[in-house]
Image (cartoon, grey):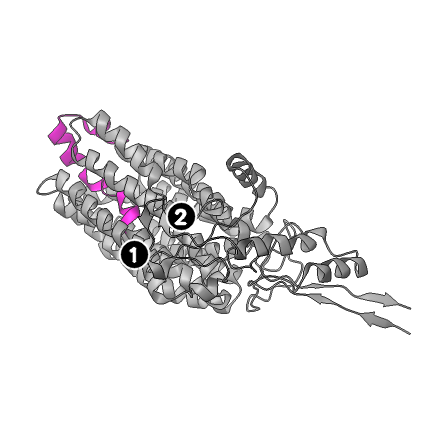
Amino acid sequence: MVADRSQTIELQESGSLHNESSIRSANLAHPAIPREVSQVHDATSSAPNGPRSAAQEHTPMRKRDFGFLPIPQSRRHDPSKAVQGEFPFTWKINALFASAATIAVMNLYYIQPMLVAIANDLGVSHDAVSKVPILAQGGYGCGILFISPLGDLVRRRQLVLILMLLTTCLTIGLALSKNVAMLSGLSFVVGFFTITPQVVIPWTADLAPAEKRATAMSVTLSGLITGLVMGRTLAGVICLADWRYVYWMAVGLQGLMTIVLWLGLPDTPDKKIGLTYLEVLWSMAKMYVTYPTLVQVCVQAYCLSAVFAGFWTTLTFLLSDPPYQYNSLQIGLLGLLGLIGAILAPFWGRLVDRVHPWSTQFLGIIINLISMIIALAAAQKSIGAVCVAIVLYDVGQQLNQVSNGYRVAGIDPAARARLNGCNLLALFAGQTSGTAIMTKIYNSHGWHPTAGTAIAFIGVGIIGMLARGPHEAGWVGWSGGWNVREKQQMSDKSANAVTEKLRVKKKDQMV
């Protein structure tokens, strides 16, 4: 005679289990359940959407930003109410987050089409001015490491406002720069504080309903991609008159955006994770050896961003040489093709909301592979092939980034900013190394070896995906099956993951 006993523990996004005692009793009945499950109640109820404690209910309402700037009445948080009920996630908030990402990230890309104009105006060599965008990206990388984790530690409304205000003021200095040293130093600092997109993306994941999270994140991400494209394009056109006008335009856009953000950002509470700033940074390092899904996502982010950055850099050289001989404006206008990927991002988000994100991530990599095969075969012969390769790679990259963001957001709701930072550090490392490696190969050996290197990077990404299946709980393997159509709320099923929805099922068989 066989008696089966099963119990399912569900942790819902809004506040996990009904009470802590039910978790403890479940653990006593089923000691095989990982201890991490019993800790989820504390982690999720400290998140901004969790239940309110008695202390929180008696906390006075915050009425001013920074102690002196009034918060609009509709944007104030009542500590006695749950955040999702008080600030329902609407298309207006989503559009606000996307717009903030667009305006902020443009700071990193204005400089790229203006290098020759700046060199001529300041009377320096092209080599000297070429270090400016490198320093801007370097500052951005440092900001990802040191500022983006603050999204798990402080109130994000105030964080975003001060970041946008700082970059607005610093951009005035860029417009007034008299020498390349001043321009370089300020570009690094502006890059360091251009972290608004990396605050609003995990913020989107926190506020959006679980069933629409990927769609909402894809809209915010499309804002970031739009800024990347529009920053280059606007700068390429405006700098034909004067490169300083570009920065004055940026000052106006950021100043206006700061006012709009002050009016529209909800004052959601901090997550109260109980860590110091240094402990937050150390926790990021530990995440790389704790969460298998994060590592798999980071491998893809590194490989595909290396190809993206290296491809665009070397494509500039290819198009400026015979048979094309395009000028900088013509090359910059090709960047508008990247808007196709941004337009499709919400569609990819809806797709990711309906299937397992592993499958859409893998599909994105295959699209990237097809793109680079086309570039290898025909980019030197046909501008049409170049355009097809650009569009396909941007589409695949968008699908991959939406899937990556969704998988990372599902690991631990109390650590989304840090997890997003870990993913972005891998992406930034890929951009830096991909640009250096592929540029050197192009200068030494030409286009075909360069495109071959891009395909090799993508091959590593494919191996990383195939090494760990969609339902694997460990680091390597395909346990749990290969059904990629099965929707999973939980992206990381390892024992260390604190997830929004965790089902633990234990069967005791007694003969």
- Looking at the rendered structure, the number of numbered marks drawn on it comes to 2
Mark sitting on residue 230:
none
Nearest the camera: 427 or 197?
197
User: Considering only vertical position in the picture, is 438 above or below 273?
Assistant: above
Left or right of 396: which side holds 188?
left
| Amino acid identity at mark 2 | Gln
**Residue 109 visible in the shown view:** yes
Q: Is residue 9 above or below residue 291?
A: below
Query: Gap in Å between the C-alphas at discs 2 and 1?
Result: 20 Å
Query: Which residue is depicted at the point 51% across and 59% down?
Result: 49
Question: For this rendering, which residue is in front, 227 or 70?
Answer: 70
Q: Residue furthest left?
A: 241
x and y percent of residue 455 in the render? Answer: 42, 47
Instruction: Mark 2: give few (<14), some (14-19) or many (20+) Cα within 10 Å.
Output: many
In the rendered image, residue 492, in percent from the top left (x then y), is placed at 59, 55
Task: Look at the image and tell me in which quarter the N terminus lies.
Answer: bottom right
The residue lying at 35 percent from left, 66 percent from top is 91
Estimate the x, y position of residue 301 in percent, counting from the top left: 45, 47
Q: Say which of 121 and 391 sits in front.
A: 121
Dot 2 falls on a residue whose secondary structure is helix
Q: In what quadrant of the picture does the C terminus appear? A: bottom right
Magenta stretch: includes residue 481: no
Which residue is labeled 2 in the image? 198
* Rendering quarter of residue 491: bottom right
- Neighbor class of circle 1 (other Cα within 10 Å; few <14, some 14-19, many 20+) is some
Residue 340 lies, in percent from the top left, at: 29, 61
Helix, strand or loop at label 1? It is: helix
Q: Which numbered dot is residue 263?
A: 1
